[in-house]
Image (cartoon, helix red, strand yellow):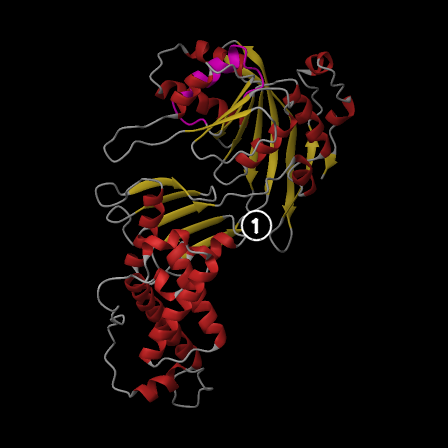
Amino acid sequence: MFSRYKKTTGTPVPAPVVKEAPQTQSVEAAKVSMRKPMPSRPGEVASGDKDKKRKERLGDIKVELHRALLDNLNLAALDTATEKDLREEINSIAAETLQEKGLVLNRDERQTLNQELYDEVKGLGPLETLLKDDTVSDILVNGPHQIFIERSGKLTLSDVTFKDEKHLMRIIDKIVSAVGRRVDESNPYVDARLQDGSRFNAMVPPIAVDGSLVSIRKFKKDKLGIDDLVQFGAFTEEMAVYLQAAVACRLNIIVSGGTGSGKTTTLNALSSFIDDAERILTIEDTAELQLQQTHVGRMESRPANVEGKGAVTPRDCLKNALRMRPDRIIVGETRGEEVIDMLQAMNTGHDGSMTTIHANSARDGVSRLENMIAMAGIEMPLKAMRSQISSAVNLIVQASRLQDGSRRMTSITEITGMEGEVISMQELFRYQRVGLTPENKIIGHFTATGVRSHYSERFKMWGYDVPASIYEPMGRG
């Protein structure tokens, strides 16, 4: 088994060459220094400093062992190796190297080291433990020694680090090369998708001044449904009743919100109300939507290659989708010139289409649509532009991440038409904040504004008799 994954050449495999740091103490003294530090006495170095030095030393050992693995493992055979065989091989090479260096590790340290070495060979090194942690939603790397993670909407500094910038760059190269991309000084930023579907973005020096910057938005295998969001307090049962009628009756819906506000999660939940008999086409930069319907066609745009060719934009996908007889089109995010084709699709028989945009309110969302049309180079009078938007978009759902990290559907607003040159809108539901707890948790409730839906008659025609009581203004949630 050992020889199966070791490099085979005409000569025996030499023992891994490891550069030793200058030492003034003997091997026996080194063994003693690697054991668990004794409680400090007056005049001795504090145990915390010893732990720190020991951790740094273990980091050096891990880097040296990783080099030894690359020297000894037959990398061509790794793809066919079973996890059990590969782990045994790594454990064997690690044990040889540790014995050669005269280093003694306790059981927990050895298990941790072997797992980290396995992650270096088959996974993404230090990031692997964070990717496996289901409570982590975002991983943000600011150089090799600073990795932040987001849990429950709050950012915290993790204790995970890379050895140095070269170590971080090696992991970045491993990710981008797997999807046929390249990142270096001439091409210092890249977007990619991990094998599990997580979104990956990196920017490297010299553009990133203090070390490579990496952002990973983790892909959630279990998407939250409407019932889950109601249970978590993202919105109320009354709002869910209204949204079900809006989606089923094929209103064109835009989910608006800031970064990390839950736009994609909301869009995915709303899609659960679409009838299973409809043909749906989805267009995304990174495939995240998980629609449960039978008839779904998924498309993913791609950037240009290193020669600047081969790009497929969301607009290209959208134009092609219109020729594929869709009942509904769902665009993961509208951010550029594809807004023209999206609005035309909503206006030309593809009712019930949905997308997301970055905006802080429903009114800001309309302004953002106007700006995107202008940036697309379309010369159109302002009134005509707004008329196009008002006839295409029926509903704007505002998602927000509040200061305590919670996510709420803070507003549901209908677009009702034009009044002169102004798009007329009416808010049906909103989240009302009333204060803060001593723990800085936001106190608030959902309330209806008392305005009846502009589309009530449409709901009845489609067989959805939405009770008038859901529009009564009162605190809920």
Q: From the top left corner, tell me how far across and down residue 215 is, in percent.
A: 40, 46
Indicate the quadrant where residue 127 lies.
bottom left
Tell me if I can see residue 159 in this picture. no
Judging depth in this view, the residue of 312 and 382 nearest the camera is: 312
Q: Quadrant of the C terminus?
A: top right
The residue sitting at 49% across, 73% down in the picture is 108
Indicate the quadrant where residue 145 lies.
bottom left
Indicate the quadrant where residue 113 lies.
bottom left
- Determine the secondary structure under disc 1: loop
| Residue located beneath label 1 in the image | 152
Across the whole image, how many numbered discs are drawn on residues? Answer: 1
- How many residues crowd around disc 1 within 10 Å: few (fewer than 14), some, or many (20 or more)? few
The residue sitting at 46% across, 14% down in the picture is 323
Q: Is residue 185 above or below residue 6?
A: above
Q: From the top left corner, tell me how far across and down residue 63 is, in percent.
A: 32, 66
Judging depth in this view, the residue of 339 and 419 nearest the camera is: 339
Q: From the top left corner, tell me how far across and down residue 252 is, in percent.
A: 57, 19
The residue sitting at 33% across, 74% down in the picture is 97
Judging depth in this view, the residue of 281 and 449 nearest the camera is: 281
Q: Which contiguous range is marked in magenta?
A: 334-353
Q: From the top left corner, tell me how far across and down residue 293 is, in percent.
A: 61, 27
